[in-house]
Amino acid sequence: MGLSTFLHQRLPHVWTQRGPLAWALLPIAAVYGTLVALRRWGYAAGLFKTRRVPALVIVVGNVVAGGAGKTPVTIALARHLLAQGWRVGVISRGHGRQTQDARAVVHNSRPLDVGDEPLLIHQATGVPVWVARARADAAHGLLQAHPEVQILICDDGLQHWALARDLEICVMDERGLGNGWLLPAGPLRETWPRAVDWVLHTGPELSDNAEMGGYRAQRQLADHAVGADGRRVALSTLKGQAVDAVAGLARPEAFFGMLRQSGLTLARTIALPDHHDFEDWSSANTGRILLCTEKDAAKLWPHEPGALAVPLVITPEADFWASLDARIAQLLPR
């Protein structure tokens, strides 16, 4: 078993229970936990600099490794705030990009330059998006270019304490806390529970150890797919025929499962590592329609222009929006 296969396929199964391999990794997890605790203490004690920017900062992140729906939540949050009349921007590290500088994301940016998720966020919302290795650098760059922005959403970064934040949203899915241990013995990036403003559950049901409360969000695929030329294809028209599907996600099987739940028949599924760049992609020319995630589309289309991207939509419950709006009104009076 290769290292990549172990990290992306074997470890997530290890994290579901406290089995022999998880116990074997526990000493490493203890070292990791100590380092995380020392780092957080360093920021709290002022040994490390925390930078504040002249905007209200909302961090959307999670404490569990792997995708839980942070980017779709960020998109939903940006759209909601825009509808409320706020001027919004988004910052991100731009995971998977090959550049190192702080830069703006534009509509025709290359995923290799800005990251696939920041590009998706900008294309889906139209708000200013900046990426940088240090999120505070992205924030300063964005605000210099767009001083009218009032609210900055940080896509991921719950553990990025170098950026001061006003509000935190922790996204959880049906995995909950897994076995409850820190990396690499478990899925946790930091110890839980810890104080956040909201926990938002995006899974179809709460896991047994997701008793941390919070709000629910419906996670589902859109009723259509999108082509490289912008055309929309109703998923209902694909029922009754075999299709192929590819996903470069932390949990590609979740995407495949949702396609099946939509009534589609998957003849072949291709699971790739999260943020896969598709530079080594070669089409099998099966003659079947190829479906992909919206996040993968910009990287796949240059090699597979006929592929169709299926958007993922996350819709938080109304009480979450009410609570969020009330807190923002307190912190950022109009």
Image: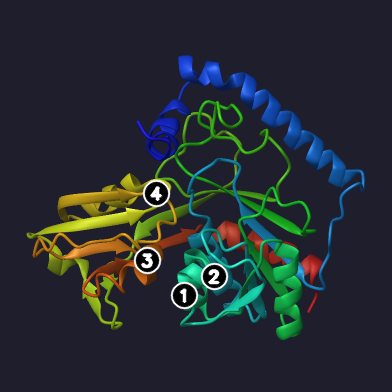
Amino acid found under the numbered disc labelled 3: Glu
- Labels 2 and 4: the sequence-earlier one: 2
* Residue sitting at x 56%, y 21%: 25
**Relative to 307, 276 lies left or right:** right
State the scheme by which the image is colored: rainbow
Disc 1 crowd rating (10 Å Cα; few below 14, some 14-19, many 20+) is some
Q: Secondary structure at mark 3?
A: helix
- Labels 3 and 1: the sequence-earlier one: 1
Amino acid found under the numbered disc labelled 4: Pro
Residue of label 1 = 110
Residue of label 2 = 114
Task: Say if 148 sits above or below 13 in the image.
Answer: below
* x and y, in percent, of residue 61 in the image: 61, 52
Image quadrant for the N terminus? top left
Is the Cβ of the residue at disc 2 closer than 8 Å to that at disc 4?
A: no
| Of labels 3 and 2, the one closer to you | 2
- Labels 4 and 1: the sequence-earlier one: 1
| Quarter occupied by residue 40 | top right
How far is the residue under mark 4 from the one under mark 3? 15 Å
Q: In the image, which disc is placed on residue 294? A: 3
Is the Cβ of the residue at disc 1 closer than 8 Å to that at disc 2?
A: yes
